[in-house]
Image (tube, helix red, strand yellow):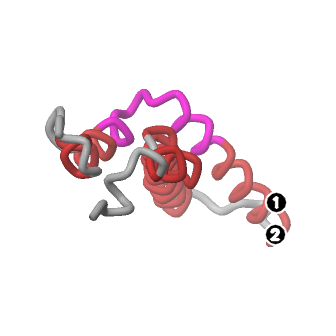
Amino acid sequence: MTNPISSASAMPTLAAGGGGDGGLRKAAEAFEAVILRQLMASMRQAKLGDDIFGSSATDNFREMADARTADSLAAMRQFGIADMVERQFRGPPGASAARFGGGGQ
């Protein structure tokens, strides 16, 4: 009796559902973007002077701009956080084939 996960027809379904390497890459970049957003928010809180033009609209705009900047920085993958997360979840080479039942049987 065949396990549905180990069948060859289940593999495209996993990849199409975000379970492939593309989904892991996007999730790792999204995690890096969250870390960068928090870093930028901490830097904004450490302001040294009073903001003479401060308002809630300005704060909202800055938060949106910071989020967009963090997403762009994460997509460039220069900090290495996404690479480390991706490596951690991918595991040792050859482990993904054994995990999905394709270990040469």
Classify 10 Å Cα crowding around label 2: few (below 14), some (14-19), many (20 and above).
Answer: few
* Start-end of magenta stretch: 69-83
Q: Secondary structure at mark 2?
A: loop
2 w.r.t. 36: above or below: below
Say which of 19 and 58 sits in front. 19
Per the image, label 1 sits on a secondary structure element best described as loop
Relative to 73, say whether 14 is above or below: below
Q: Residue at x 81, y 69 (%)?
A: 55
Q: Position of residue 48 (x, y in %)?
A: 52, 56
In screen coordinates, is 51 left or right of 5?
Answer: right
* Count of marks overlaid on the render: 2
**Identity of the residue drawn at 72% across and 55% down:** 62
Label disc, if present, on residue 55 of the rendered structure: 2
> Residue 89 at what x, y percent from top left?
27, 49
The N terminus is located in which quarter? bottom left
Q: Residue at x 65, y 50 (%)?
A: 66
- On the rendered structure, is 8 left or right of 48? left
Q: Look at the numbered discs 2 and 1 and tell me whether their residues touch, using CB distance below 8 Å.
A: yes
